[in-house]
Amino acid sequence: MSDLKATVIETTSGFHVEGYEKIEYDFTFLDGVFETQNRQLAQLYERWGRCLAIMDKNIFDIYGSKMQEYFKYHNVELKIHQTMIGEKAKSLETFTQIVDSMTDFGIIRKEPVLVVGGGLVTDVAGFACAAYRRNTNYIRIPTTVIGLIDASVSIKVAVNYGNYKNRLGAYHAPMHTILDFGFLRTLPEAQVRNGFAELIKISSCAHLPTFNLLDKYCEQLISTKFGRAGDNAEVKQAADEINRNGIFEMLKLETPNLHEIGLDRVIAYGHTWSPLHELTPPTPLRHGHAISIDMAYSATLANIRGLLSDEEHRRILKLFSRCGLSMDHELFNEDILAKATAAILKTRDGLLRAAVPSPLGSCKFLNDVTDEEMAAALRRHKALMQEYPRNGAGIEAYVDASDTGYTVNAAVEEPTKEVEANGQKPTEPVVAGAKDGVLRTGLTSELKDLAANGHSNGLPTVQAQT
């Protein structure tokens, strides 16, 4: 939430306005947010007696019933708008569908929308709240590693436009963010790996102790879903320390620069060339894999420049490889590198501002890299990749049904075929329009663009709407 204090004075030629905006929002660590004995969420809606939730469909399939029981227990009327948002559906169409649900619900000024899902869902729904009456409150419950660690920290909200990530957006702080790492228990391993990249990002440039823990427990963190699956107390304790320190470090870096007035941003490591490259393949790369390619290449560039020792360089690359994140891609080539550089120069006010670890656990920014130097570093990087498993390719690197769900038609019954969602299967189909307090979104036109395209983990076939 924010409050604005401003003054206006008369000048010889007109008027001068000066204002200062106070932004404040809270984070609460809470295991079992939908357990009826935990009143924290319900208390946020007691004043209104009702709640509109924008919820990822994969999450609804697993937690929808429990969430409905929770609000019923606390006498809060609940309406749920289900949505499925992958990178291709992180669009204006999805944005307007959420806005339509807000209108149908009759959101009152200052009444908060509840947003439940991964970083893509919180981005688009948050942007809808920023635009609706120019400022509508919302509360976030992130459910993925990226959502919990990265997207929850920032107040940036956005949609993609054209072939560019987050081209349209705003800065809009939530009232509250509830961090429940229990959601990771049902998260597919591919999504756990996807979020692991964000922790490598922040630790390699800002917090060496966290990097050391990631390095020590890498495989166990992924296989146990950050200690939430199984009963390994040591890994869970390490995971909790990693997550808390990672979030705190990102907050310390982001908070003085919430509106990105300062463009030298440590947390932009891995985000110099990836914004364009992520959406370049016919089926987009997962965000974590896209930034990992950028980070690995940036580390090679830093090593060539003498900013990162050979030992530290290899340590970073080895960690990416061990956890199955991408370090290279056939379409990450000199042409894409040049186009991505041109695009980021516009975003960063004419300077490259490429964040690189130097030394490991600290950060430097590069502004004087020539096109020839970048191309030579890319050739060196691709040669290095031949020494690593899969030639630097990642495991389950492309978006699939766990990112985007499957097609829902608002006018007909949903597909009866069971589809794995967030690690589990729905028990039975749900009929759109049933009197269950659920609003549904049809996104077929967006999902058609995400067909398998030859990838082993591509999307299921999309059925045309009738």
Image: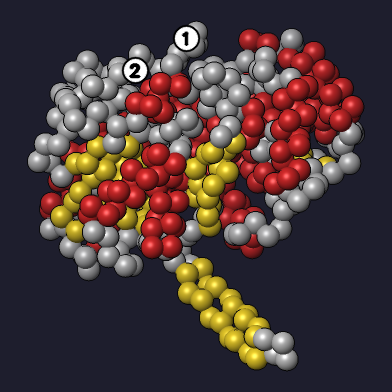
The answer to whether one can see residue 185 in this image is no
Residue beneath the point at 55% across and 73% down: 21
**Depth order, front residue of 298/316:** 298
Q: How crowded is mark 2: few (under 14 residues within 10 Å), some or many (20 or more)?
A: some
171 is higher (above) or lower (below) than 463:
below
Q: Residue beneath label 2, please?
A: 462
Which of the two discs, 1 and 2, labels the residue nearer the N terminus?
1
Residue beneath the point at 65% across and 91% down: 10
Q: Which amino acid does label 2 sit on?
A: Val
Name the colour scheme. Answer: secondary structure
Query: Any mark on residue 456, and which?
Result: 1
Left or right: 283 in relation to 56: right
Q: How crowded is mark 1: few (under 14 residues within 10 Å), some or many (20 or more)?
A: few
Residue beneath the point at 82% across and 17% down: 379
140 is higher (above) or lower (below) than 389:
below
Residue 38 image point, x, y percent? 25, 54
Q: What residue type is labelled 1?
A: Ser
Residue beneath the point at 58% across and 20% down: 281
Q: Is label 2 in a helix, a strand or a loop?
A: loop
Kindly indicate the quadrant of the structure image that contains residue 397.
top right
Residue 246 image point, x, y percent? 57, 46
Query: Any mark on residue 396, and which?
Result: none
Left or right: 51 in relation to 141: left
Residue 148 image point, x, y percent? 46, 44
Left or right: 261 in relation to 84: right
